[in-house]
Every structure is written in C-alpha cells, then in structure tokens.
Amino acid sequence: MSYADRVYIETCKKILSEGTWDTDFNVRPRWEDGTPAHTIKLFGVVNRYDLAKEFPIMTLRRTYWKSCVDELLWIWQKKSNNVGDLNSHIWDSWADASGSIGKAYGYQLAQKHKYPEGEFDQVDRVLYLLKNDPASRRILTSMYNFGDLSEMHLYPCAYSMTFNVTGNRLNAILNQRSQDMLTANNWNVVQYAVLLHMFAQVSGLEPGELVHVIADCHIYDRHVEMVEKMISLEPYDAPRFRVDPAVKDFYGFTTKSFSMENYQYHPFTDKIPVAV
C-alpha cells in the first residue's frame, strides 16, 4: 500500500467520523447552481512524508502529476501570475480578461528585496541560503502578503514553506490555510514533494521529510459519497519517482526532468463538482 494512500484514508475517515459541519454558518463557496457549498472539517491536521523512503502519490485514483509539476514550475520557477504561461486551464476561473490572477502566487515569489549579500526574490533567497548558510533557521517563503490580498483573485491556499537542513537532509514544512481533500490534497502533496526534491538536488542535499500542516482540512458535502467510495478501495504500492540527475540549476528543470515508474491507480469516472 502506498503510504500516501494510508495517510489519505486515515485523514478522511477521521474527518467523516470526528469532523464538524459548517451548515450553521453563511459560507463563501457556492456550487454552480448557486447553493452554498458546505463542508465537514477538522482543524489542525498534520501529515508527515519521508521522501527518502517513498514518493507520496496516491493510487486510490490518478493524480495527474505532470500537470501538478507544470503548475509548480509556473509558480516557483516562472514566478508567473498569468494563466497564459500555464499549460492547463485549472486557473481560468480566477483569471481576468488579460489572463492575470492578480498579485497572487508567482507574483509574490518574484518580488525582490535587498539583503546584505545583494538583491533576491524569495526563491533565489532560498537557493542562496541553502548553499551558503544551510544551518540558518530563516529559510522560508510566504505568499500571504496582507498588503496585496485585496488585489489577489484568490487568496493563497498553500501559502508558506519553511526549509530546514538536518545533516545532509533537506526537510520542509508546507503550511496550508485550507484543503479540499477530494480535489486538491494529493495534488499539493505531490507538488511540494517535487519542489523539495528540486531544491535538494541543486543544493547538494538529500530529500528528507515533508510536513504538511493544514488549518482547515475539509470534505465538501457533495464530495462525501465519492470520498467514501475511494477510501474503500485497496491501494497499490507506490511508484518509483526519478529526477534527472544532470539538472544542477533550479531554473533548468522542466516537466521532462521527472518520471514516475510503475504508477498504478484505480480508475475514477465520477464528475467532481467544484465549489468556487
């Protein structure tokens, strides 16, 4: 059984058995027909994945990991906030007529600031510190800029990464304010596991532990039946994840730099309603 599947099953079971419904609240998200999109949730979920042991991709249903990586590169490498630079249409609902999603995600990572060693944006500052001051406890990024929130078409969900070098292992904490367990959970886990691999490789380190901290971990009302069906399946073993060892520059990675060997997954044919 894939470890990511085990974590997912345990988390979903706990949400469904111990979670709290928000049906007494006036919620922001709406279904396509205009009705409120309510959830059952847990607060403060923490999941840990040791990337040295296994790559955390689900087999209960297919995670389109190439698209995950493409979005990751759009945010962290291209540092873009324009959907024209993305090869999928997952952000189209939040884009304006020019294709911009406002001052969100990649825009925040691209902003440069002055340091004693020179001028860096957030990504380049991480790269610099990992190579020059790996013992630092200040290696982190944040996309949740309060001064720009009013100009973001969607507030960042996965908003902060804290990196920590222990021995020769690069560990990281991903902080997420909100997590839709059916549509986004493994998508985000896969993305940030790949990111940790990328930073580790170009910094001469080994990938270590990814800790995923979720403030509001929820299942939407119209997703409950689909989730229950998924977690009743028998998971497959995790595939083997590979990174092209020839890439030594963070900006040299492409979607072709990664491969997934023997990825087995259960078919998923249900149409998933999306709350916006």
Image (tube, rainbow, N blue to C red):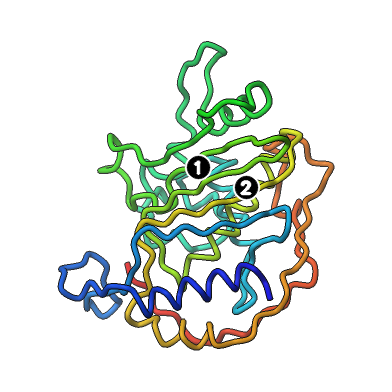
**Residue closer to the observer: 85 or 160:** 160
Q: Nearer the viewer, residue 248 or 79?
A: 248
SS at mark 1 in the image: strand
Q: Quadrant of residue 48?
A: bottom right
Q: Position of residue 67 (x, y in %)?
A: 60, 61
**Type of amino acid under label 2:** Leu
Asked if labels 2 and 1 touch by Cβ distance under 8 angstroms, the answer is yes
x and y percentages locating residue 115 in the rendered image: 49, 15
Q: Is residue 159 above or below residue 264?
A: above
Q: Mark 1 or mark 2, which has the lower sequence index? A: 1
Q: Which residue is mark 1?
A: 161
Identify the residue at horizontal 48%, vertical 36% (top origin): 141
Instruction: Please state if 269 lies on the left or on the right of 170 as rendered.
Output: left
* Observer-nearest of 271 and 261: 261
Q: Identify which amino acid the numbered label 1 is placed on.
A: Met
Helix, strand or loop status at disc 2: helix
User: Dot 1: within a 10 Å radius of its alpha carbon, few (fewer than 14), some, or many (20 or more) residues?
Assistant: many
Q: Quadrant of the C terminus?
A: bottom left
Q: Nearer the viewer, residue 72 or 265?
A: 265
**Percent position of residue 233, x then y:** 59, 87
Crowding at dot 2, Cα within 10 Å, few <14 / some 14-19 / many 20+, comes out as some
Q: Position of residue 235 (x, y in %)?
A: 65, 80
For the point 70% across and 79% down, the residue is 236
Cα–Cα span, label 1 and label 2: 10 Å
Q: Quadrant of residue 218?
A: bottom left
